[in-house]
Structure formats: C-alpha cells, structure tokens
Image: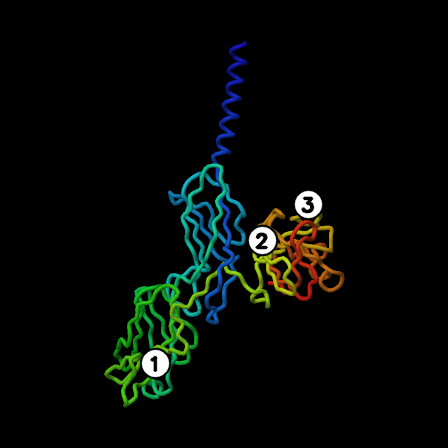
Amino acid sequence: MWKLSFAIAAMVAFCSCDLMGSYSENGELRIAFATGQQALTKVGLQIPDTSDFILTVSDAKGNVIYDGPYGRSPEAMLVKPGSYTVAVVSSEFSKPAFSAPQYGDEQCVVVPSGRSVHVKLVCTQRNCGIRLKIDSAFLDEYPDGVLLLKSSFGRLVYSYSEKRVAYFKPGDISLILSDKGRDEVLLTRRMEASDMLDLKVGVASSGGVSSEEKEHPNSISISIDTTRNWLNDRYVIGGVNGGSAARDALSVSDALQSVGAEDVWVCGYVVGGDLTSSSASFEKPFSSRTNLLLGARSSVSERTGCLSVQLPSGEFRDDLNLVDNPGLLGRKLYIRGDIVEAYYGLPGIKNISEYELM
C-alpha cells in the first residue's frame, strides 16, 4: 500500500513538473509596426492600410505559425523556443502590374525560453516603378506604334494615353517600341527595390541631345525627367504621422506617445466599451453609451495599449455608441480630438469634433 501511494505521488510530481516545464519552455512573440520612423518621400502614392498587410510567421523548419491579415493576428503568439521568420507584405506581387506598389519587411528572430520578444516591422517598397511621359512629337512620328515595358517576370503594354505607374520586380527593365512589325529596344535600365523613375519619350532634336538623353538611329530620344525623378525616393511604413488630417492620422501607438496634443486625428479599431477605471468589455452586448475603446488592431482583447474615447452627448454619442451601434465593433475609426493623459485610467481622446468610419 505504501509503495502504491509513493508511486502515485511520484507520478503526480512528475506530471506536475512536466507541465510546469512545458509552460516555462514557451516563449512569446509580439509583432507591431515600428514607431519613430519618418516618411522620407510620399511621392503622391496611396499608402495602404497596415491592418490589411499579409503577415506570415514560420519556424526554422518552415512550419507556419500564422498566415493572415496583420489586423487579425493575436497581440501575443505563444511559441516554442527557437528561430522564427516574420514576414509581412502589403499585397502579393508576382508579375508586372499598374498601380501596384508592394511594401514589406522580413526579419529573423530568436525566441528564448520563457522570454517575450518584440518584433518591430519597418516596411519599405519591395518593387520598383516606371512612368512614361510621351511627347506629342513622338505620337505624330509613330501613330501606330506600341510601347512595351518588359522584364524577366513579364511585360506591360504602355498605351499612349496611360498615366499610371508600371510596377516591376527589381532587375533589368527594357523599354521596347513595336512598330510596323518590328521590335526595337530603346532602353534597358537596372532598377532596385524602391526605385521610381519618370522617363520622357520623344523625338530627338536636330541640334543633338543632352548628356542625359539617349538617341537612336530612328531619332527617338529617351531621357530621365529630372524635374520629376523619383529615383531612390522611398516611403517608410511604420512611421509617425502628423495627425493634421484624416489621411495623416496618428496610429494608436503614436497617440499614446502624444499625450497633450490637441485637435489631432487618430485612427484605430473599435474593440470595446463599457469602461471603468480598471476594466472594459470586448464583446456584445454593451451597456454604456458614453465611451468606447480604440485598439491598434481589431483582434485586441485587453485594454493595455488602447485608447479610451469619451463620447459627448449629441451626434457623436448617437452615431458611435456600441449599445445602439453594435456593428461598429471591429470597424476602423478616424477621430479628431484632444489626447488626454487619463480617461477611465487610460490615455484617451476627449472633445471630439469630427470622425470618419472605414
């Protein structure tokens, strides 16, 4: 009997230690877009919403831990100790396309046992772009011609009326004129990631061409438009915006570092409401019409790192409270107001003057 009791106790002790050991062996991955990076040049491009970026986390053996929208990813991923590849892209890009800039970042990180590792994503443009500016004299000289942009990954027909930017994977890109059954390579240029280039296509003048122009036997001239040369201009995603307009709104992370700012735009996801000084509700139904909670992503389920929002009586409370508008949960909200140090125990937004819903 004594031996049986000892054996059972030993088994319980072994199992308990094993469970504790398994738990302590796990590490944690926390992934977010970096703050403090400045946009170098926006060059008129529409910057995509980071919540829609495709996030992939895989281990050293290639096993996928997460693959899906960044905005729906968990704030913390419990993983075994080891090496992990964290990759994010704004969209898939495999062949040439118009109006298709791709932004992304990839990092390899090591997660120690029992430790939390914070990954800060800083996304830059992964592909390159070319835009043609076709001179009217060229149109007169080659009315039936067709211009093509070609790389080893594919080609695009650049019509004479085309105004959009053609995007390619980095590498050699050729400009080709197809006219009267004959193809002629006018120019080949090696492009790197983030390169953006304007090219003028015209007819060479009788007086010769400048050092920036390339003249062809058929009197075609190709030149870099130095007045609108984007080469090496980049936009860094994960940067601090100014908050002066909705399109330049502060992220939740930026707003948390901007307490005291007045009359600024902030964007985040409606993740909850029913705030008290120490708690919040993240699921329907809600009971309070006076406040809501903004998170950095729609999957947030804890109030730490969130912004509280005061809904004053009137239009804003009627439109945004979660009691009467439960469908707002998970929606992206742009809101204009003052960032205060504390509202229900969290940095918050008061004195709302304007809002926009995505």
* Residue 310 image offset from top left, x and y in percent: 70, 57
Circle 3 residue: 278
Q: Residues within 10 Å of mark 1 (few under 14, many from 20)?
A: many
Q: Amino acid at mark 1?
A: Val
Circle 1 residue: 201
Marks 2/1 in contact by CB < 8 Å: the verdict is no
Q: Amino acid at mark 2?
A: Ser
Circle 2 residue: 298
Q: Residues within 10 Å of mark 2 (few under 14, many from 20)?
A: many
For marks 2 and 3, give the CA distance. Answer: 21 Å
For the residues carrying marks 1 and 3, which lies nearer the camera in this image? 3
Ranked by sequence position, the earlier of labels 1 and 3 is 1
State the residue lying farthest toward the top: 1
Left or right side of 268 for 10: left
Secondary structure of the residue carrying tag 1 is: strand
Q: Residue 137 or 296: which is nearer the viewer?
A: 296
